[in-house]
Each structure stands twice: as C-alpha cells, then as structure tokens.
Image: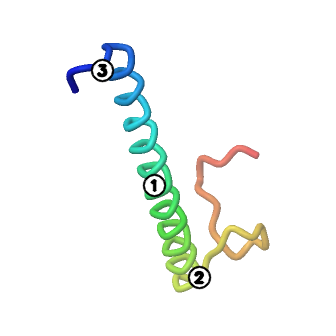
Amino acid sequence: MAGESRVDRLLADSEKLREDLLRMAARLMTFSEQLTAETQALRVEAGSDDTGTGTHRRPPYATD
C-alpha cells in the first residue's frame, strides 16, 4: 500500500475492527439467547420457573 497514508491505514484498520466487533456481538447475542432458552428448559424440567407463580423455591437469603 505504497500510496496509502497513515490516516487511511488507521481508518481501514478501524473499520475492520468495527466489523469484527459487530460480528462478535451478533455471535454473543445468539449464544446468550441459546443459553437463556436452555436454562429455561432446565428450569421447566426441574419443576421451577421464573414466572412468579410461586412454583420455585426462594433462596433463604431472599429479603423482599
């Protein structure tokens, strides 16, 4: 990149990093959604849930 200035290189590198971060964020969001679904399925299988219906045991340290 003989004719490319330092600023142009930095801008190109910055854009590549931005694109990499966006891809990583999308992967993390997908992973989070999968983990949440698996956790909910395990809770249902165990007979507890987060619906507030009282079907789950409250920890002894709960204060509300």
Question: Which residue type does callout 2 highlight?
Answer: Val
Q: Is residue 61 above or below residue 26?
A: above
Q: Residue 63: x, y in percent?
A: 70, 44
Q: Is residue 4 left or right of residue 26?
A: left
Residue displayed at 22% across by 27% down: 1
Sequence-first disc among 2 and 1: 1
State the residue at coordinates (45%, 37%). 18
Q: Which residue is mark 3?
A: 4
Q: Position of residue 35 (x, y in %)?
A: 47, 67
Q: Position of residue 33 (x, y in %)?
A: 54, 65
Pick out the residue farthest to the front. 3
User: In this image, 33 relative to 7: left or right?
Assistant: right
- The 10 Å Cα crowd at callout 3, few under 14, some 14 to 19, many 20 or more, is few
Q: Amino acid at mark 3?
A: Glu
**Circle 2 residue:** 44
- Residue 17, by quadrant, is top left
Residue of label 1: 28
Ranked by sequence position, the earlier of labels 2 and 3 is 3
Q: Residue furthest bottom?
A: 45
For mark 1, give the secondary structure.
Answer: helix
Task: Describe residue 46's horizontal placement relative to residue 15 as left or right.
Answer: right
Considering only order in the chain, which callout, 3 or 1, is on the residue closer to the N terminus? 3
The quadrant where residue 21 appears: top left
Q: Circle 2 sits in a helix, a strand or a loop, which is it?
A: helix
Instruction: Find residue 58 and name its label.
Output: none
